[in-house]
Amino acid sequence: METNKYFQILSGDRGPVFLADQLKIPDAIRLKNVDRINIVSGSRKGQFIKSGIGQICDISGCAIPTEIRPSVWNEDKNNRTYIIPNMVPALKAGVVQKDQSIFSNEMNISTDVETEIEGVRVLKRPIDTDQLNEITSRLFDVLGSDQIVKTKAHIAGLLNVGGKLVGATMSPKCNFRISGLSRDEIVNYLNSLSMDQLQRAPGGILWPHPILSSHIEEVNEVNKGSAEFDLQYFRLLKNLLGTPLELVKLMRFLDTQGSKFTDQENDLFHFLSSNSSEIFDENQFLLGNWIELINIDGKEHILRGATPLDYDQLSKIAVNNFLNAPNYVYLRKPENQDELNKYIEANSPEGVADLCSRQNNICNLVIEHNDQIVGFRVVRKCGEVADGRRMHTSLEHTCKGIGSILLTKSEQIAKQAGCTKMEIHATGDSYSWFEKKGFVDQGIRPNGISQFHLMVKNL
């Protein structure tokens, strides 16, 4: 792999086209309900995205008109404000000036990249490009030893379907392993960059650079020297630029299935309407109905807000767990029959409807696959405390990470809503699972039905 050659090409005017050409998709996508695509991005990344989707999207054999538009959401103003990671591209795509709109069959798309090294998120920009010694020390702390680097390219699309807006997000991952750099290598790397390049690189790290690229030993568990390494390397570069191949899946999903989600009562970001003054300045967020596409065991799932049509399914999942899940074996003892009946009654369709309709709920989340709900989560806001009211995974889908996804997303939403800690009423043996997720057991407490472990976690 000639990293210096690739870096020179990627840094030049032909860089976007070159990178797009490395990952060709043979079958064009015929989008039936998309007449125009607006890439809401800076000009350079916009060119990368435009070059990528230009190969794979057409309408009846004709290219879709595509335009690069600057974001009107003030990212710099909010860069010290907590924003759910996959909400950032949604804000870029969905925040517009009050005199603008998204026309029918028009799609806005945007991306944002998140990079973590040893669990610490890499800064968006260098501290100060005039302080190269400080940047050198900071980069040496990050890159001076062997590391696993985790990246997520959060992507979002917002489509006007028959006058109604529906948005979707995805967060494809691409992880790689690097060997440690010497301080001299970091100094040489920084000296080779222009100030413009240093300002543009997230955290001062421009991974295609030959010095850095030579230390990439493995991408997505494919080792350097393998026949597949170059392909994985280009996938990584595309992911780091916010133009992953999954963008195609998101666009296809909105085009073919977006109309199914235009009439939801709640969505992943519905709480933004009450906090808009803190984020949006003079602009507005086109709320629409936002969902998230997630990959579980290689299968596409949908994370979204619950609707009244879901209440029967939610009830069946909870009741089935009480009757059959190992976690609730104590409820099925003869002496606890009264408690079991009360739990079943509290989780009847009417009980679930009451649970999900409280005004202080900040999320009623469900995960579904093939129109079947496989897990749900309800959280309320009580001052600065997020009160985790209910979480269940269907027995047929346990041990697949569904509970972890629901918990993580509810924690993000709670933090976005201003909560500083989350409380869980863990029944049965579930307290040990929550302990592994960072919750601290505060002891056993009584409730109206039985007892629970009060679990607390700072957000």
Image: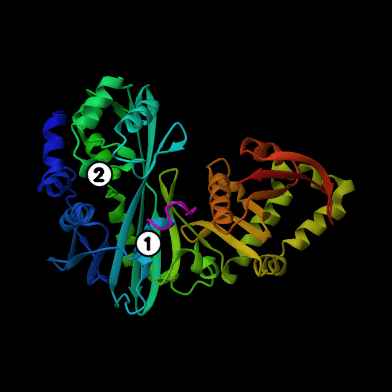
Which residue does the image show at 31% across and 66% down from the upper left? Answer: 255
Residue, disc 1: 74
The residue positioned 82% from the left and 42% from the top of the image is 444
Above or below — where is 38 with respect to 21?
Answer: below
Q: Position of residue 174 (x, y in %)?
A: 34, 39
Relative to 39, 453 lies left or right? right
Q: Which residue is mark 2?
A: 238
Q: Secondary structure at mark 2?
A: helix
State the image quarter where residue 433 is shown.
top right
Q: Amino acid at mark 2?
A: Lys
Depth check: give the residue in front, 332 or 210. 210
Mainly helix, strand or loop, the magenta region? loop
Kind of residue at disc 1? Asn
Q: Is residue 367 above or below residue 278?
A: above
SS class of the residue under badge 1?
loop
Find the distance from the CA under tag 1 to the CA under tag 2.
25 Å
Residue at the spot 15% in from the left edge and 42% down from the top edge: 11
The mark lying in front, picked from 1 and 2, is 1
Judge whether residue 448 is colored magenta.
no
Neighbours of disc 2 within 10 Å: few (<14), some (14-19), many (20+): many
Q: Nearer the viewer, residue 337 or 310?
A: 310
Chain part drawn in magenta: 76-84
Camera sees residue 213: no
How packed mark 1 is, by other alpha carbons closer than 10 Å (few <14, some 14-19, many 20 or more), is: some
> Where does the image place residue 148, in percent across and percent down from the top left?
39, 29
